[in-house]
Amino acid sequence: MKNLNLKQLRVFLTVAEMGSFTGAAMKLFLSQSTISSHIQALEEELGVDLFLREAKKQIRLTKEGNRLIPYAREIISRCDALEHSLSGYVEKELVIGASTVPAQSFVPRYVSEFLKKHPGTSVSIHTGDSEEIMNLLMNHEIQLGFVGTHYNRQSLTYEAVGEDHLVLVTPNLPEFFQMKERGVYGRELLDQPLILRETGSGTQAMVDFYLNRLEGRKKPLAPVVRTSDPDCIKELVRLGTGVALMSARTVQDAVKTGQVIQFELEEIPVVRRFYMIHRKKGGLSELGQSFLELVRTEPFQSYS
């Protein structure tokens, strides 16, 4: 690959992002013919087609093109880091990711503390479900991630940074209040209509694990609603649509204000953990390493 160069890789990533040669040309302030030449040269150097040219100037990535994306991002990231190091460049922005519960609970505190210790810098936080955050990390779009489940991704390092537990929440109705007073556990209310998180959520992964190991369940639990938004779930519960299994951290305010009633699932809490994740290879910038050390030295208080 003697003729492979960074310019080709940057053009490739821009075409992939924009979905067209025209869009990439406009973003990079280059002619469309120049864009085409860079892509053609890259394809010839690699010996594969990276894009399928379709009607009306539409393009889409080939299988090989999709495989190239994370490698191209890593190469550019490392070369940029080397250039910045040699030139005395001072990094000003840290890009991280967080799944729903971490983003709503402990990540803001870490960001606030980090900015106090690094004045003049900024932090961008990408949010999504746990699977989305892991994919962003593997694609070199973020430096660190915070998720609520542990997938078997051998290219990532997982560090447990705290824990929470699952609870079942119901509408604040007399019948449920009486059950709460009698000491009923949440597992006894799973015959109620269920509201669940979306697939890919760390919370839902834990919920699925819990439901799958329940014994004596007479029938499958078919959800009446699935949504990615915990606030939407709480509102649906409040309105009497059904019950939900949720992270205790996400419902504590709704419980305190009497919007919903919280039931422990079992006598022994069903614990879930949160993880800080980063790539095993590719390294962290100085800001990324500083953020990682901050989290390691100031673990958040587990919910109780």
Image (spheres, rainbow, N blue to C red):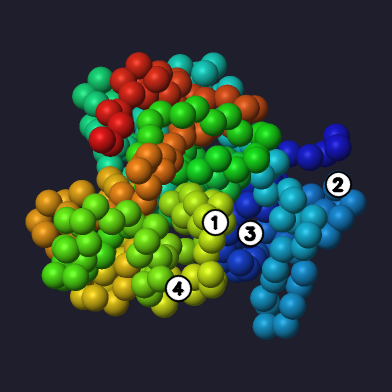
Q: Nearer the viewer, mark 2 or mark 1?
A: 1
Quadrant of the rendered image containing residue 115:
top left
Q: Nearer the viewer, mark 2 or mark 4?
A: 4
Query: In front: mark 1 or mark 4?
Result: 1
Q: Give how far apart the Cα atoms at labels 2 and 1 are.
A: 58 Å
Q: Give me the residue at 28% from left, 56% from top.
A: 184
Task: Name the element at disc 2.
Answer: helix
Camera-side residue: 101 or 118? 101
Residue 192 falls in which quadrant of the image?
Answer: bottom left
Cα–Cα gap, marks 3 and 4: 37 Å
Identity of the residue drawn at 35% across and 65% down: 189
Q: Which residue is mark 4?
A: 223
Q: The residue under label 1 is which amino acid type?
A: Glu
Q: Within 10 angstroms of label 4, few (less than 14), some, or many (20 or more) residues?
A: some
Q: CA distance from mark 2 to mark 4?
A: 51 Å
Sequence order check, earlier mark of 1 and 4:
1
Q: Is residue 14 left or right of residue 230?
A: right
What amino acid is found at the position of numbered circle 3 in the picture?
Ala
Q: For the residue labelled by badge 3, is the local secondary structure a helix, a strand or a loop?
A: helix
Q: Position of residue 254 (x, y in %)?
A: 17, 57
The residue at which mark 3 appears reads as 16
- Between discs 3 and 4, the one toward the N terminus: 3
Label 2 or label 1, whichever comes before in sequence order: 2
Q: Which residue is mark 2?
A: 45
Where disc 4 sits, the SS reads: strand
Q: Residue at x 54, y 56 (%)?
A: 215
Q: Nearer the viewer, mark 3 or mark 1?
A: 1
Q: Which mark is residue 215?
A: 1
Instruction: Give the alpha-carbon distance from disc 3 to disc 1, as whole Å.
Output: 48 Å
Distance from disc 2 to disc 3, alpha carbons, whole Å, reads 18 Å
Which badge, 3 or 1, is on the more N-terminal residue? 3
